[in-house]
Amino acid sequence: MKSSKVKVILTVLIFCIAIFSACGIKSDDLIGRWNYVSYEYTNKSLNKPLADIAIQKPYIEFDKDGKCKIVSSGKFLSEGTYYLENKIIRYTETLEDGKKRAIPFLIKSLTAKDLVFQTMDAEVKVITAVKE
């Protein structure tokens, strides 16, 4: 009886692991251009002005080869590489002097058409984007 309980528990555990790993976000889900439609600071007490999205038309673009760029007002704000670690986009920005800076983003939700992610620094900003 004891061994049958262990078998049932192991079977359930393996099934749960398979289900949860199948629900993970894949890099292919991110590929493409994501146009920002809104963003806001989670800390409402921050009195920082946000750029006008309708005028600046910011977007983030993820390529299949692991490259990423962030553009606003037709200008490159940032370029670098990325990889996905569970729900975190591990973005490494290449600065003008050749130095690198790690900038993680937490994916809050991702569908075929919508991406909601947030910065992971002291001034958390939540960005909602739609796929072009």
Image (tube, helix red, strand yellow):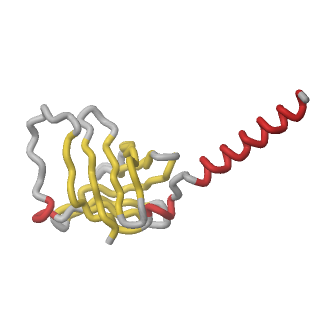
Which residue is drawn at the image coordinates 10% and 40% (left, top)? Answer: 48
Which residue is drawn at the image coordinates 42% and 66% (left, top)? Answer: 112
Q: Nearer the viewer, residue 81 or 109?
A: 109
Q: Is residue 132 above or below residue 72?
A: below
In this view, the residue farthest toward the front is 1
In this view, the residue farthest toward the bottom is 132
Left or right of 20, for residue 77: left
Q: Is residue 61 above or below residue 117?
A: below
Which residue is drawn at the image coordinates 39% and 43% (left, top)? Answer: 104
Quarter of the image containing the C terminus? Answer: bottom left
- Please state the horizontal and vertical placement of residue 96, each as a whole percent of the image: 28, 52
Which quadrant of the view contains residue 70?
Answer: bottom left
Left or right of 20, for residue 58: left
In this view, the residue farthest toward the top is 2
- Please state the horizontal and vertical placement of residue 85, each as a whole percent of the image: 51, 46
Q: Nearer the viewer, residue 119 or 83?
A: 119
Left or right of 81, for residue 38: left
Count of numbered circles on the image: 0
Q: Nearer the viewer, residue 113 or 66?
A: 113
Left or right of 8, for residue 77: left
Quarter of the image containing the N terminus? Answer: top right
Which quadrant of the view contains residue 36?
Answer: bottom left
- Please state the horizontal and vertical placement of residue 73, each as a whole percent of the image: 15, 64
Q: Nearer the viewer, residue 23 or 70?
A: 23
Which residue is drawn at the image coordinates 36% and 44% (left, top)? Answer: 103
- Please state the horizontal and vertical placement of residue 50, each as a whole percent of the image: 12, 49
